[in-house]
Amino acid sequence: MANAAAVDSHDHDHHDHKPPFFQRWFMSTNHKDIGTLYLIFSLTMLFLGGAMALVIRAELFQPGLQFVDPHFFNQMTTVHALIMVFGAVMPGFVGFANWMLPLMVGAPDMALPRMNNWSFWILPFAFTILLSSFFVPGGAPAAGWTLYAPLTIQGGMSVDMAIVAIHMMGISSIMGAINVIVTVLNMRAPGMTLMKMPMFVWTWLITAFLLIAVMPVFAGAVTMLLTDRHFGTAFFDPAGGGDPVLYQHIFWFFGHPEVYIMILPAFGIISHIIPTFARKPLFGYSSMVFATAAIAFLSFIVWAHHMFTVGMPLQGELFFMYATMLISVPTGVKVFNWVTTMWRGSMTFETPMLYAIGVVFLFTMGGLSGLMLAITPADFQYHDTYFVVAHFHYVLFSGAVMAMMGGAYFWLPKWTGHMYNESLGKIHFWLTAIFFNVTFFPQHFLGLAGMPRRYADYPVQFTEFNQWSSVGAFGLGISQLLFVYIVIATVRGGKKATAEVWENPEGLEWTVPSPAPFHTFDDPPVVK
Amino acid sequence: MILTGVFVDMLLSRPVFSRAKLTSSFTNLVCGLGLLLMSGAAQAEYRLNLQDPVTQTARDIFGLHMLIFWICVVIFVGVFGVMFYSIFKHRKSKNYEASQFSHSTSVEIIWTVIPFIILVVMAIPATQVLIKMEDTTKSDLTIKITGYQWKWGYEYLDSDINFYSTLATPREQIDQFNKDTAQPLGENYLLETDNMLVVPSGRKVRALITANDVIHAWWVPAFGTKKDAIPGYINELWFNVDEGKEGIYRGQCAELCGKDHAFMPIVVKVVSGDEFDAWVAAGGTFDASGIADESEIDTNERAEASEQAAVDSPAEQATPVLDAIVPAAQASDAEWTMEAAMAEGEKAVTTCIACHGQDGKGGGGGLFPAIADSAVATGPVEAHIDIVLNGKSGTAMAAFGSQLTDEQIAAAVTYQRNSYGNDTGDLVSPADVAALRN
């Protein structure tokens, strides 16, 4: 397979010979171009999903209904989440994988370049189907991104469109995951044993196995939903003897590993940034690998902590409580190792490092509120409130999304050949971090005080913190325009980046010139 | 506006403790972190922490919550104290020379084992509380709670009392789209119902929870109870409100159940055991038992329209108990005139307009069909009654046969067939509905 990719690259005599525009961007089999496509797609979806979040926050600025009716509000919460999870975060990390995995393992391209092309190009069609559901009778899906039956059985044809879109996204993700596994297992440079692989490669390898394990489960759940809706089955429809709780068990068997699918690659990125700017090797490399694997394993046996209130037997609740609490051990190991990597380093605080520190700090807050949520009796109070909303935005936004932003600043000079504007980058970081906290920290209080989530309208005592949250959300959204400006400006010009970019960074990607030529590692490097 | 107030307060450094009864520990922490505490005086009281518990279970949960919270705070401060120390000391700008150590097995074993021990410390009390919470035996009375789109039904299984509990906040407060018709929000906005669940203090109340259509969740934060109401399942929970904590407690539906998820609150009136017995003996009526029906007072204060309605049909308003299973005494045919049916229908269709719209033009971008000029509301009467009685499977159209009386259904159907531009002239009688009930 390695040879196939190598032959492909021999078609071009020169390293930097690029095909004409249409062939290059629409028929690409080049991992760098496909990575770029994925990243552009992800950023577009981030803004689209963010716009929906702003509709939500505008409506919630005051009690009473001012802008949208509750049905449309539910469409916003549902599609915001579907877009952010499947359109922004997952493709974003696939974009990083495409760009960086071959460079990190010293491979000329991904192992399966044509499949790579296909797995990207499914996505725009999948999201076109999902988004066009706004224009069918009844509007877009409004049952929450979890698509719980039997509420989804009531939904209009948009639910069917969402199911088709989810199948397509699933196929795309599985193909992407296959590509990662095959590339990593077969195409590493001579001498790069598994335990010498960079952390980002490790975290993505484990993520890819999670994807292959759980995306088919999700596909199964939504297919059963589809047949319940149209073909007279009653898997989940109680009217026909079906079991609504079964849907939740299947969904969360997918849904919990999905959470780690969205965070493990972020852990990988952080594990590259911190050593670089601490000028010190990553502390406890092998325990980082084992911790990642342990998190991945545990992610399969904790799913029902999302559904403590469905009325499980005591034994079930105890099991899922204990298993969930256990996850904090390997996660703690990762945090301790990052902090120890900084300890007695010689740190500088360029934008990627600010992001990495921000992620470690804020993600840990989300992790600790996650530990609180694991405690079943307390979860009965937190469940389905804004406390949960705050929790998962702390792990998803200040974990996954901010890690991607940090990663983007970290590798942008490698991708474009130009240094980004450091001052603007730092401003972008501080705006993002501050507005993020203004948006989501008050939501902890809202949830504890008793505000349920997915509410289009709320009692008056929740007003103040909702206003903080709404103001923060608009600030957070607008600040991201600065990110777009910085990226475009860096693509267009700026100080030339050296091959190493940073001070003695670790990794093969820093041995190729900046910008990385169209084809790299035609001859594999040797890792000692 | 409020935010400006908050900023002004921050500038004036108003005392942080001016208001809100908070657990002082939590407040201290938040103060310490300098977070979001200042507030304008004009707003309704807000909270930073769980609601004040009124049951032993809720107190246990509160204790657990605070225990874990403080453990998390200590861990957080410890870990990030180290990190920020490092950030300030170990930086290149201070010419700090980077050490090159990269692992230490002993340290790594320590920080794997210590968190594990902390987890065990957390798990023991959590397990104890959970075991108590799941023990629904030896209850003093049992209430069946059913979630509907979008209201709650309550049945006292030890007596014959049963009724529905629907949002009492007037539509004019909720709809703020048009400032001309919008009313200011009441004190208990979205936390008020026409009928309250009445429970005694000092007795173990067991609730059986289910749903009629989609999943809901019954939650009263002060009781420390939340359980999903799932169609096809009967879940259990229990609570025992402390004696001396009689009063009104409010909660909301906590599982997304469609359009009006935010509009099906829970209001519980806790009375003493004696008062409760009197209430039950009076068949669940307030007048006869001598207990103030605060729900009705609230409603009348808030909405003059409903006051007018109460005058129109005092019989229905005098008792909050709607006996849905056995239809109320029906008006004789002589009294069932078009005028009477239309007047009754205007009230009865509140159930329908939740989805089909105030103007009968439908809603949800077509998900909820229009009544105006619709095939059902202008076609055969029997089909119209049938869909109201039995619902339409695979859609949000529920079977209202068990929720509404013959009289209410007849009135609603009559109203729909002669409003919104429909002019079939049909007068549907309660007998017509009764004839079609199975």
Image (tube, coloured by chain):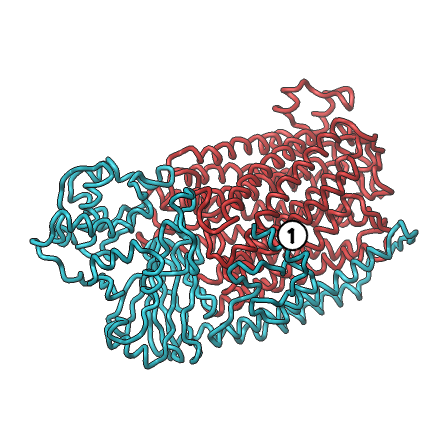
Q: Which residue is mark 1?
A: A437
The percent position of residue B146, horizontal first and vertical second, equals: 33, 61
Q: Nearer the viewer, residue A77 or B295?
A: B295
Q: Which chain is cyan?
A: B
Residue B369 figure quarter: top left
Q: Nearer the viewer, residue B351 or A217?
A: B351
Task: Report the side of B220 relative to A238 (left or right).
Answer: right
Q: Which chain is red?
A: A
> From the viewer's perspective, is residue A18 above or below residue B19?
above
Residue furthest to the top: A20
Identified at 31% across, 52% down, the residue is A240
The percent position of residue B30, horizontal first and vertical second, equals: 65, 64
> From the viewer's perspective, is residue A453 above or below residue A427?
below
Identified at 69% across, 62% down, the residue is B33
Q: Chain of mark 1?
A: A
Residue furthest to the left: B334
> From the viewer's perspective, is residue A129 above or below residue B257?
above
- Is residue A151 in view? no
The percent position of residue A265, horizontal first and vertical second, equals: 67, 46
Q: How many labels were placed on the picture?
A: 1
Residue A175 figure quarter: top right
The three-letter amino acid code for the residue at tag 1 is Asn
- Is residue B32 in view? yes
For the C terminus of chain A, which image quadrant?
Answer: top right
SS at circle 1: helix
